[in-house]
Image (cartoon, grey):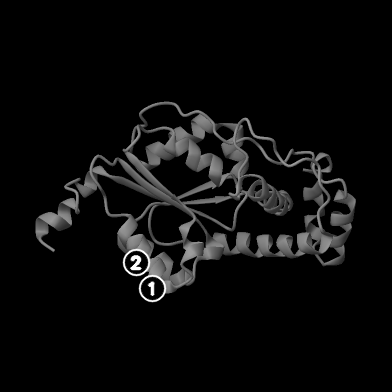
Amino acid sequence: MSLIAKLFGRSGAARHDVKRLVIMMPWGRVGSNLLSSLIKGSFDSGTVRFANEPLYQMRDKAKQEAWFRGFYQPEANERLIGSKHALRALEDRDATARLFEELELPVLRMRRDNIVKVAISQERAKLYARRSERETGKAMWGVRKGEDPLPPTPLDAEEFVDTLALVAAEDKALAAFRPDCPLFDLDYETLVASEGKTLAAIFDWIGIAPDRAPQERFVKATPDDLAKAVPNIAELRNAAAKAGLERLDPMFDG
């Protein structure tokens, strides 16, 4: 590849003019759909490219590395290239961290303090995805504005406990995932408490000015009062305690 091609990429867009971002989360249900929607909605069409968890479709270390190297090549008129991924989807976490360092990718680590709500939201999202697939032929994992969320529905206690344990492990693993590149830590609670202020802080960190204020596309799928969404919440609480996760019991109350 010529020096000019290296500096400007295949399309002629100067690399230093294009900002890049990687959002990493433990697994899901931490507000990443909301955040990525707000980011994409802040820029004019054709100037932002954003990928939503593509790594689950390429469970191979070499393929994942090739994807990152190819995806973050700038194209014409682009101002921002971003993607979001679950830590759980990485085939080699250490190798991916080194790749981020090599590519100098800014990494936003996103999590949620209340992992009980993460687990319940994950289980409800599975049910919502199955319902939407039956009704429309496409599994939807986020509830968009104007769509009906999942009604109050009991959850399988054993499946919930397995999910909760996995969520707890992945949340801990994200804390240890610290590539030596620019890092920005964001929790779900901060985002929902002040979307505008949070977005401004992220854009300032990336070094880019948005084109406009975005409109929300997703709505909250699970209410803060878990009993309103899960009729058998007491059963789930007892199952978690019996499984040795009693330290998480206060999270059932919010």
Compared across the picture, whether 97 is left or right of 240 comes to left
Q: Nearer the viewer, residue 103 or 205?
A: 103
Label tally: 2
Placement of 216 over or under 234, stated as above or below: above
In which quadrant will I find the C terminus?
top right
Q: Residue at x 46, y 29 (%)?
A: 214
Q: Position of residue 224 (x, y in %)?
A: 75, 39
Which kind of residue does numbered mark 1 sit on?
Ala
Badge 1 density bin: few <14, some 14–19, many ≥20, Cα 10 Å: few
Q: Dividing the picture into quarters, in which one does residue 223 lie?
A: top right
Q: Which residue is mark 1?
A: 62
- Type of amino acid under label 2: Ala
Query: Which element is circle 1 on?
Result: helix
> Where is residue 79 drawn, in percent x and y?
30, 40
Q: Name the residue furthest top.
A: 213
Residue at point 31% right, 60% down?
70
Classify 34 as above or below 108.
above
Dividing the image into 4 quarters, which one contains the N terminus? bottom left
Residue to which mark 2 is pinned: 66
